[in-house]
Amino acid sequence: MTMINQLANPTRFMALSGRLLPWIAGLGAVGLVIGFYGAWFSAPADYQQGETIRIMYVHVPAAWLAMAFYTVMTISAVGALVWRHPLAEVAQKAAAPIGACFALVCLITGALWGRPMWGTYWVWDARLTSMLVLLLIYLAIIALWRTIDEPTQAGRAVSILTLVGSVNIPIIKFSVDWWNTLHQPASVFRMDGPTIHPSMLWPLLICAIGFSLLAVALHLVAMRTEIMRRRIRTLTILAADRADRTAGMAGYGSAAE
Amino acid sequence: MSGFLALVRRDLALSLRIGGGASFALVFFLMIVTLTPFAIGPDLNLLARIAPAILWIGAVLATLIGLDRLFQADAEDGTLDLLKAGRLPLEGIVLAKCLAHWLTTGLPLALAAPLFGLLLAMEPAGMAAAALSLLVGTPALTFIGAVGAALTAGIRRGGVLIAIMALPLMIPVLIFGVAACNAAVGGTIPFATPLAILGALTLIFAVIGVIGAAAGLRQVD
């Protein structure tokens, strides 16, 4: 806890994240190069799905990260509401667009994968639908961020929405599963099964690690940008205030003359 | 308790008298029911099949009416500050306002559903099921919307934002509401199952919505 408290100091966070960022981004790039090499050249094509299985190496990590970033946002929301850490607010704000992007990547790659496999870009499958709803919730959170202009007030409001959403996501998941079994479509499509061959698993895991590091790097950059944006905002307000006061004094002076 | 009832009575009076717009939701509901056949054609068999969906979509959208002013009007003229200073906890205030909103929105919709079901060629069993499912399910919609209303109480252009925030969270209610209607007119599952889940959703959202909306109102200066 003391470590978190020390890191929660924005100045210290800026120094530390600035030092760590090149390493995380570099490691992520290396991981993605190795992972994509494995996905493209070393992993075999699937005996049923052929070469399209290679979409999986982007699709699955994107799905994981879309959910992981909502978890990041939920934890940050608790930090922002309970401990009022400004950094938690910043972390939460920075996480929303990244999570939304991964949800979108997951949906788009899923559609591209679905076209050759299922014969259609979109089916109202339970997992697709849940991911779409997750994207909608991300978009709602971003919309709320963009509507309230005072950062602290926006942070609290978004934190509440994030927590309400996090309670709802399991309920939505359950409802959508239930709805899907009720309206089971005629065509049956399944993944290959629960087991995945090791020759496919290791590129997938390396891709997932690479994407995660990339996501962490993006998150850190976004947090640093947000901290700097808030500093600029405060400085601008102070400068305007000062200019206002000098102008006011000048006004009084001229009136007195 | 007397403060609670007084607040419910005040909100009811405000919405029922001139300028309140208590009937807007019902008229809007009727509009949606009327527009749908124009969009998909006057085929009564098709309409009867999708009638529960039309009624529930209509109810979800009609619930949004009035939500943007649920707390905003009180936040603007200072009533909210007075209420906050009173003895009734903020959660109680939210509950009272949600109750008043439901009495003027969800309840009329549920009562009118059988009548509107006639326009959509629903079977009598289907109409009763639609009315019952709306009666059980619409409070959940109000409670979900209350969170959005509380979060945007201090914002001038909150209306569309409430819809964007609340609609994804209303999906479970919509699913089980339509499922209950469909189960009543035949199907593999008994009517009671989705209805019971709908009731559970209303109870869950009564807790989440009231606590969430009260937390949201505390952020409003």
Image (cartoon, rainbow, N blue to C red):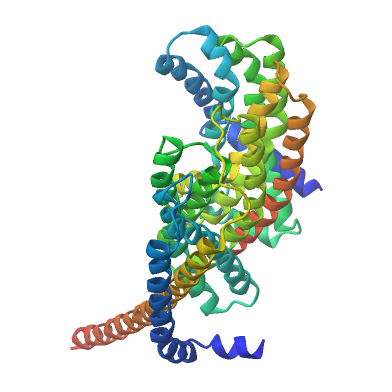
Q: Is residue A69 left or right of residue A37?
A: right
User: In terms of image quadrants, where is residue B128?
Assistant: top right
Question: Is any atom of residue B142 visible in this view?
Answer: yes
Q: Residue furthest right?
A: B1
Is B67 drawn above or below residue A7 in the view shown? Answer: above
Q: Position of residue A159 (x, y in %)?
A: 57, 64
Q: Nearer the viewer, residue A48 or A237?
A: A48
Q: Nearer the viewer, residue A97 or A177?
A: A177
Is the C terminus of chain A in the top left, top right, bottom left or bottom right quadrant? bottom left
Is A141 drawn above or below residue B31 in the view shown? Answer: below
User: In terms of image quadrants, where is residue A164?
Assistant: bottom right
Is A248 drawn above or below residue A51 in the view shown? Answer: below
Q: Which of B156 and B216 is in front in this view?
A: B216
Residue at 63% in and 19% down: B112
Residue at 67% in and 40% down: B140
Residue at 40% in and 60% down: A146
Q: Position of residue A87 (x, y in %)?
A: 52, 79
Q: Position of residue A188 (x, y in %)?
A: 56, 33
Question: Is any atom of residue B11 visible in this view?
Answer: no
Is the N terminus of chain A in the top left, top right, bottom left or bottom right quadrant? bottom right
Q: Which of B107 and B179 is in front in this view?
A: B179
